Amino acid sequence: MKYLFAYLFLLSSSALAQSEADSTPPVFTVDAASKTLQETVLNIWYDFVAHIPYIAVAMVVLMLTGIVSLITSKVIGNIAKRSKMRASLKELSQRIARIIVWLFGILLAAMVIFPGLTPAKALGGLGLASVAIGFAFKEIFENFFAGILLLWKYPFETGDFIECESIMGRVEKISVRMTQLRKPDGELVIVPNSFLFKNPVLVLTHEKTRRIQIMTGVAYAEDARAALPIIKEAVESCELIAKDQGVDVFLNGFGSSSIDIEVTWWADPTPLGERKSRSEVVGAIKQALDDANIEIPFPYRTLTFNEPLPVRSTDKSD
């Protein structure tokens, strides 16, 4: 019995020592860390090699997507050309078609690379990601949708002259998020689409002609009513005005040195066309009034004094 108790004591002691040895934390060594890193890199490499066929197929899908996008854009362009669709609506249709084709192509490529991915999971993940992306790129999406609305509502086309908040120029291109304007002095201005969408825009070339107005005048000593037909005939003789839309000449008011006369006519709406027409009209009015001996006054000043001024002769003989 005594030997049995001794044997059991030794057995329990060895078991306790073994459990303490098993609970001892592993010792960190450089070899163990490098081995773990090597195994991780090798696993990643093996997974990549295993997915190479899927990646290759996905690249082919993206290439086919690009080809289908180009073909779709050309088909829509041909349809728009035959139906005489306006340029802005044609560009908008092509852009939306390309976006739809690329969305389907990217979704299909993602499903090829990740076989477990389904359209429902992709759309769910896209919905969650779109919220975060929407907050991060708020201004970009705002300009994008503003560009779509600008093309859809047809306020102006490429080649039109527009003016918005003291910015005036010819529209060269309406892209996804911005519009390029070429100012009359040759400078290029990049304007965000949201800026044009939120502010009033003057489309100077919306019609083929635009009314131009100047103010002239004749001296108070002249017969102002007699000057009206002379001015009108002079303006109607100009070549750069719209003959079919008439010329209007009115007495406008009493100026500081003249009877003011308002002259309006219609001409080319572009800034250069307006300047040329204005220059021709001003020259014609000046020549006509000079030929009729009607004075175009310059500012007069009349000085009055309470007492007569003494006059002193400067003649040395006196």
Image (cartoon, helix red, strand yellow):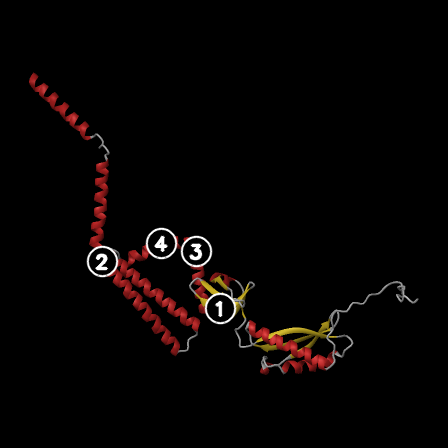
Q: Which mark is residue 58?
A: none
Comparing labels 1 and 4, the label whose residue is closer to the camera: 1
Question: What residue occupies the far front of the structure in this picture?
Answer: 317
Report if the CB atoms under discs 1 and 4 are less than 8 Å apart: no
Q: Residue 255 versus residue 219: which sits nearer the camera?
A: 219
- The residue identified by callout 2 is 54
Mark 1 or mark 2, which is nearer to you?
1
Work out whether mark 3 precedes mark 4 in sequence or the reverse, and give the earlier one: 4
Residue appearing at x 54%, y 73% in the figure:
270
Label 4 packing within 10 angstroms: few (<14), some (14-19), many (20+) = few
Pointer 2: residues within 10 angstroms few (<14), some, or many (20+)? some
Confirm whether residue 201 shows in the render. no
Measure the C-alpha gap from mark 2 to mark 4: 24 Å
Q: Nearer the viewer, residue 255 or 110?
A: 255
How would you rate the neighbour count of disc 1 (Cα within 10 Å): few for under 14, some for 14-19, many for 20 or more? many
191 displayed left or right of 111: right
- Spatial CA span between label 1 and label 4: 35 Å
Quarter of the figure with residue 309: bottom right
Q: Are marks 1 and 2 in contact (CB under 8 Å)?
A: no
Mark 1 or mark 4, which has the lower sequence index?
A: 4
Judging depth in this view, the residue of 75 and 132 nearest the camera is 75
**Mark 4 = which residue?**
129
Q: Viewer-nearest of labels 2 and 3? A: 2
Amino acid at dot 4: Ala
Query: Which residue is the site of mark 3?
Result: 138
